Image (spheres, helix red, strand yellow):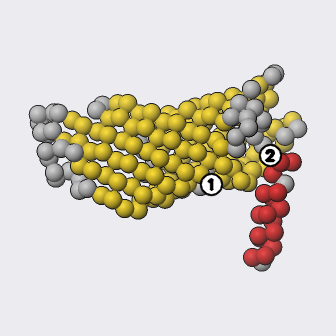
């Protein structure tokens, strides 16, 4: 049974070019991210895919209420296919990938009620995006709507920066989590 499963996975991966659901060309869009994550606080990310590069990029910038965060993800979809065709290679599909992430976050408060306190966090690790998408041809462009979950594991660092030391302790170690993403890309 294990051999049959391995042969099916290898066959799907090798047949990827014939049944790929993602269009060629430039892909640009927005992704809403959230969940329990070492990748950053979530929010909205810019999604980029260049024609000659196999990597799907996500770039997040968070600015709110004394917080600054910057995160980058890069994913390679090693398995993708078409589940229900609409037109040619366009329609409802799936993808499974392997990627990495790097995140940085900084919070600081000078609120006199709480004294001065803050923290800095850094995360770096690997992720496995698993998702579905719909590609809809519209004239010369294609619209893609996608959703995925990305379990991840990596190294996390947290440093307490302020006068008030009872918030959280400094941390350096393994962290894991799951990020959910919902996005749209325009392909041209």
Q: Residue at x 38, y 30 (%)?
A: 63
Per the image, the residue denoted by label 1 is 98
Residue ranking furthest to the front: 52
Within the image, what quadrant is residue 115 found in? top left
SS of the residue at dot 2?
loop
Q: Residue at x 81, y 73 (%)?
A: 4
Q: Residue at x 78, y 43 (%)?
A: 21
Q: Left or right? Give the position of 23 relative to 114.
A: right
SS of the residue at dot 1?
strand
Residue ranking furthest to the bottom: 1
Q: CA distance from mark 1 to mark 2?
A: 16 Å
Residue 155: x %, y % from top left: 42, 58
Residue 86: x %, y % from top left: 84, 37
Within the image, what quadrant is residue 15 found in? bottom right
Whether residue 113 is situated above or below residue 125 in the rendered picture: above
Whether residue 173 is situated above or below residue 121 in the rendered picture: below
Residue 125: x %, y % from top left: 49, 55
Q: Left or right? Give the position of 48 relative to 87.
A: left
Per the image, the residue denoted by label 2 is 20
Which sits in the foreground, 4 or 127?
127
Say few, some or many: other residues with alpha carbon within 10 Å of mark 2 (under 14 / 14 to 19 / 20 or more). many
Within the image, what quadrant is residue 74 found in? top right
Residue 117: x %, y % from top left: 19, 42
The numbered mark at residue 159 is none
Q: Left or right? Give the position of 73 relative to 169.
A: right
Question: Considering only order in the chain, which callout, 2 or 1, is on the residue closer to the N terminus?
Answer: 2
Whether residue 186 is situated above or below residue 147 in the rendered picture: above
């Amino acid at each position: 049974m294990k051999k049959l499963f391995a042969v099916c996975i290898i066959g799907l991966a090798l047949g990827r070019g014939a049944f790929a659901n993602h269009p060629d060309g430039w892909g640009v869009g927005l992704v809403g991210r959230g969940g329990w994550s070492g990748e950053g606080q979530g929010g909205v990310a810019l999604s980029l895919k260049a024609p000659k590069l196999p990597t799907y990029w996500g770039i997040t910038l968070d600015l709110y209420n004394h917080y600054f965060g910057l995160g980058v993800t890069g994913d390679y979809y090693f398995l993708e296919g078409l589940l229900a065709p609409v037109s040619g290679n366009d329609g409802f599909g799936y993808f499974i990938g392997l990627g990495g992430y790097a995140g940085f976050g900084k919070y600081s408060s000078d609120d006199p009620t709480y004294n001065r306190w803050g923290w800095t966090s850094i995360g770096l690790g690997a992720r496995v995006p698993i998702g579905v998408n719909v590609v809809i041809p519209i004239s010369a462009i294609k619209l893609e709507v996608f959703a995925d979950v990305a379990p991840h594991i990596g190294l996390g660092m947290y440093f307490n920066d302020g006068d008030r030391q009872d918030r959280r302790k400094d941390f350096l170690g393994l962290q894991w989590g799951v990020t959910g993403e919902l996005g749209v890309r325009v392909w041209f």
